[in-house]
Amino acid sequence: MININLPTLKKEEGKEKKEERRRKMFLGIDVGGANTKIATSDSSLVDSIYAPLWHDRAILYDVLRRVYTRLEDTGIDIEGVGVVMTGELCDCFRTRREGVLKIRDIVSTIFEGMEVEVEYFDRSGIFRHGEAIEEDPLAFASTNWLASAKLVSMMHRDVIFVDCGSTTTDVIPIVGGEIKAKRSDIERLHSHAHELLYSGVLRTNVAALLRKVKLRGEEYATSSELFAITADAYLVLGDITRADYKCESPNSYAFATEREAKSRESAMRRLARMLCCDLEEIGEEGAHSIAVQVKDAQVNELITALREMRERYSLNEVISAGIGDFIVKDAVKALDMKLLTPSWDRRLSAVLPAYAVAKLLEIEIANDNAGSAGSNDC
């Protein structure tokens, strides 16, 4: 098992030490369809930027340009850039192949001026240069979860890694330090796999989770409109804050300000619309009840997946990441499994794939340099 030095965030370092760390810093980029996440290998720079590619894929260029400027303004010296992605699935691209290539082109355009190597993480778990993407673009599609799982596997040999994010939940079995999950999304979505649950705690349509709800002892069918999303449910329940609500609300266009759109009352009104009514008709208690049922549906979905992993691989320990870690805690508790304390804090947890790909690249370069030094000594 590899001992990975994760950053100690509270310790204040001297100026000379900071400069030394900057010279050895690596940047990780996770290009998603809704959010682009960045992190440096020492965690001095960590961010998640809402950048919906389906509105305009050029938004990625603007976001990365700001990241580049931010690095220059802060004097951060990047030794290498590691990239993972899931944004290729956005329907602004005709095919996923096209998406991978376009994302590669934008990243390369932005960072070529830094005169550093940009490495892309593929499905086999290795880094490759951008030119290699031409040969097999799909080998680089949807690899962000794999980077996180690989980092976790270096620290925990037998564990179920769960990353519950804004849009999806990854459930990854690691046995003897080996990642047992399938590599493509379609394989992980297979009904027997339970490795990719396409629901998250922000962007998922409530109608995708609940076809019926119970209210005051009666059962009602829900509308299949995009009236409410999971972020509304968890804002009402207090599991997330307004600051965590990093996506558009379903009816954001109806409000003068984002603050109004993402208020608890607005979220309850959207939940009421799931029953084709106003909040005044079901009351706050009714909206709260719908929110509870949304959470129960997601927790139960994860319980099913975890139970399957436990039985299939004889695993009883779970480690979690992502802004939906509260879902993981409830599922683990229901199954009386053991939830491990992660080595990362909540800030890193929300962008773990970006941090993981930065850290993995740092480790690989360090190993290559050590090997070269050893060869020169011979």
Image (cartoon, rainbow, N blue to C red):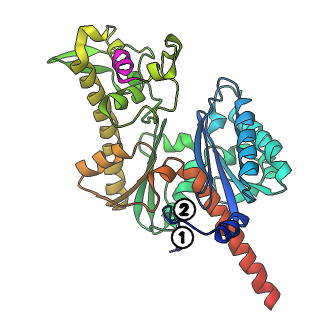
Q: Residues within 10 Å of mark 1 (few under 14, many from 20)?
A: some
Q: Is residue 291 above or below residue 102?
A: above
Sequence-wise first label, 1 or 2? 1
Helix, strand or loop under label 2: helix
For the question of whether residue 137 can be seen, the reply is yes
Task: Give the residue type at disc 2.
Answer: Leu
Q: How many marks?
A: 2
- For the C terminus, the image quarter is bottom right
For the magenta stretch, what is the residue range?
263-271
Q: At 66% across and 36% down in the image, what residue appears?
A: 88
Q: At 49% across and 13% down in the image, what residue appears?
A: 255
Q: Which residue is mark 2?
A: 151
Helix, strand or loop under label 1: loop
Of badges 1 and 2, the one in the foreground is 1
Where residue 15 sits, quadrant-wise, is bottom right
Q: Is residue 65 left or right of residue 345?
A: right
Q: At 55% across and 42% down in the image, what residue appears?
A: 185
